Each structure stands twice: as C-alpha cells, then as structure tokens.
Amino acid sequence: MSQPEIRIPEEIAPQVFALASRYYADFRQDFTESELVKAGSEVDIPPEFIQKAIQDIQAQASQKLEQQKRIQHQRQLLIKIGAGILSVILLWSIWIYNSFAKASVQVEAAWAQVENQLQRRADLLPNLVNVTQAYADHEQSLANTLIQAHQSYLEAATIDEKAAAMGEVDRAIEQFYDYATAHSELQSNQLFTNLQYEIAGTENRLTVERMRYNQAVQHYNQTIQSFPNSLLATALHLQNKPFFKTADSTSPQTPEK
C-alpha cells in the first residue's frame, strides 16, 4: 500500500510557496525576458517597465565593466611608467658610478707619477750626503740633515705626510746649496754638477706631475659634488680627495756658479 499523502496546514502554505520560489530562483539563476514580463504581470508591473529595468541593469553592468577595464589599464600604465623610471635611474646610477670610478683611477694614476718624482728626488739625498762627507768632513750636521730628510720621506705614508717630508727634503737641499755656494771647490766637482742637473730636472718633472695630480683631484671632487651626482656619492660615502701641496711652496734654488 502507498503511504498516505502528507497534508500541509493552510497557515504555512504561503511560507512554503515563498521558500520554494527562492529555491527555484537559486536553481534557475537566470530568466528569459518573457518570463520576467510574465512574472511582473502577476504583480501588476507593465512589460515596458520590466524591459527598461533590464536595459538599465545591463547598462550599469557594462559601465562597471568598462570602469574596471580603465582602472586595470591605468594600473598597467603606472606599472610601465614606474618600471621605465626605475630603469632610467638604474642606467643613470651605473653611468655616474663609472664616471666616479674613472675619475678616481685618474687621480690614482696621477698620484703614482707624483710619487715616482718624489722618490727620485728623495733618492738623490744619499748622493748629496756622499758629496758632503767627501768635501766637508766637518759639516756632519749638514749630512745628518740630509739623512734625516731622506728617512722622513721613506717613513711617510699619507699624502699629507709625504708633503711634510718633502718640505724637509726641500730645506735639506737648500742648506746643501747654501753650503755649496760658499765653497767654490765643491761647485767644480763633476759629481755635484751632475746632481745639480738631476735635482733641477726632477723638480721640474715634479712640478708638472703635481699640477696634473691636482687637476685630476679637482675634476674628481667636482664630479662627486655636482648635483645630482652628489646624491649617489653621498649614498656611496664618497669623500673629496686631498690636493697635494708641499709644506714649503718655495723650491730650493740652484746656486750660481
């Protein structure tokens, strides 16, 4: 036997219809225009209003989609612009860094030439000591001055220390020339004459190389100080390089023969 049909109380029938309608709407998820018009007629809504409502909702959906596309396009454009700016900054940083490195190498190369001439000049002091000891046995203080000046240069490490040491070298050579001026027999010595030419030649080359070094330092300092290079130089903790100035700017004069 079939089971008896369940009877639904009349008072809950409206609730059943409402819930069933919702379930049906969730199941269908879409309706045709005729279905909506039919449903609207059941609640006394004219068809033209149903059609207008459909058009308005479709237009709103289309506008929303277009707006989303514009936002996405603008976002992509901003990303491209940002990537372009970052690329330009990166390329600029590489180019500026290379200019820093090039200027620094030029300074180091110029300083190497200065050091070569400083070393040549300091190396002449032992020869002056030999001449002093050969022709002026009683002038031990002059020999000691020359020896001390040479030692000071050998112990100098920094640019400032070498500049101070070269001041001592200049004063020692000047004292030697003062002594040679007072002793004509020393001026007639061939060894002294050769040393005289070597000292003068070295002094001239040193003047040229010192000028080139200071020009390279000036170029380097201007490169890292100019804007916007200074921004990258500050980030890299780059500092100005020192100029080379002797402690005593007056060079020893060659004695008159």
Image (cartoon, rainbow, N blue to C red):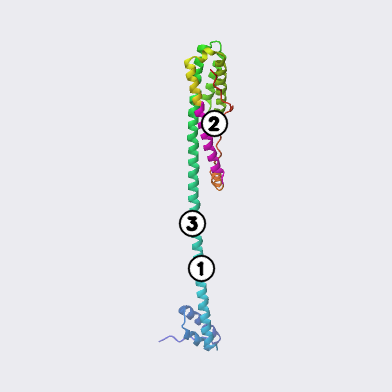
Q: Residue at x 52, y 30 (%)?
A: 207
Q: What span is in magenta? A: 203-226
User: Where residue 244 sits in the image (x, y, percent)?
Assistant: 55, 32
132 part of magenta stretch:
no
Is 212 colored magenta in this rendering?
Answer: yes
User: Where residue 120 sits: x, y (%)?
Assistant: 48, 25
Residue wearing tag 3: 84
Sequence-wise, the earlier of marks 2 and 3 is 3
- Residue 143 percent coordinates (x, y): 54, 16
Q: Which residue is mark 1?
A: 70
Q: Secondary structure at mark 3?
A: helix
Q: In the rendered image of this protein, does residue 190 appear above or below residue 217? A: above
Of labels 1 and 2, earlier in sequence is 1
Marks 1 and 2 sit apart, C-alpha to C-alpha, by 63 Å
Residue found at x 50% / y 40%:
103
**Kind of element beneath mark 2:** helix
Residue 163 in sight from this viewpoint: yes
- What residue did someone put label 2 on? 159
User: Closer to the camera: disc 1 or disc 3?
Assistant: 3
Q: Nearer the viewer, residue 92 or 5?
A: 92
Q: Is residue 124 above or below residue 85?
A: above
Q: Which residue is painted at 51% across and 77% down in the image?
A: 59
Q: CA distance from mark 1 to mark 3?
A: 21 Å
- Residue 132 seen anywhere in this rendered image of the structure: no
Magenta stretch: dominant secondary structure:
helix
